[in-house]
Amino acid sequence: MDISKPCRRCLLSEMNDASKMDLVKKGIEDLPEIDRADEKVYGERLSKCRLCDNLLSGTCLSCGCYVEIRAAIKKGRCPEKKW
């Protein structure tokens, strides 16, 4: 029996969970282009999420969102006010 711990500092794109990653990709693709953060902002936001104690397996423990979707939203805000 394999009992693996959740990854504390992983984004969904770095894990082997295709169903969740497909959900995240679809969520980002469904955002109108005008509402998407540019790649630089998106990367900076995810860098800060990776360092946050509230990240657990790609999910924000403060609000329950998938951080990769929240970071992709131009007007998205971190619930911990880190970005």
Image (cartoon, rainbow, N blue to C red):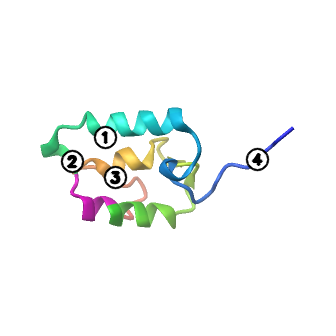
Query: Which part of the image, by quadrant, shows the C terminus?
Result: bottom left
Who is closer to the viewer here, 56 or 39?
39
Q: Which residue is mark 4?
A: 4
Q: Which residues are magenta?
A: 37-42
- Location of residue 31 in the rendering, given as x and y in whole percent from the top left corner: 23, 37
Question: Which mark, by number, is residue 71?
Answer: 3
From what the image shows, is residue 5 above or below residue 46? above
Kindly identify the amino acid type of the residue bearing the numbered disc 4: Ser
SS at badge 1: helix
Who is closer to the viewer here, 54 or 4?
4
Q: Which residue is mark 2?
A: 36
Question: Which mark, by number, is residue 28?
Answer: 1
Q: Main secondary structure of the magenta part?
A: helix
Kindly identify the amino acid type of the residue bearing the numbered disc 2: Arg
- Location of residue 61 in the rendering, given as x and y in whole percent from the top left corner: 54, 48
From what the image shows, is residue 25 above or below residue 62? above
- Between disc 1 and disc 3, whose residue precedes? 1
Q: Is residue 83 visible?
A: no
What is the CA distance from the residue labelled 2 to the residue labelled 3?
A: 9 Å
From what the image shows, is residue 24 above or below residue 41? above
- Between disc 4 and disc 2, whose residue precedes? 4
How packed is label 2: few (under 14 Cα within 10 Å), some, or many (20 or more)?
many
How packed is label 3: few (under 14 Cα within 10 Å), some, or many (20 or more)?
many
SS at badge 4: loop
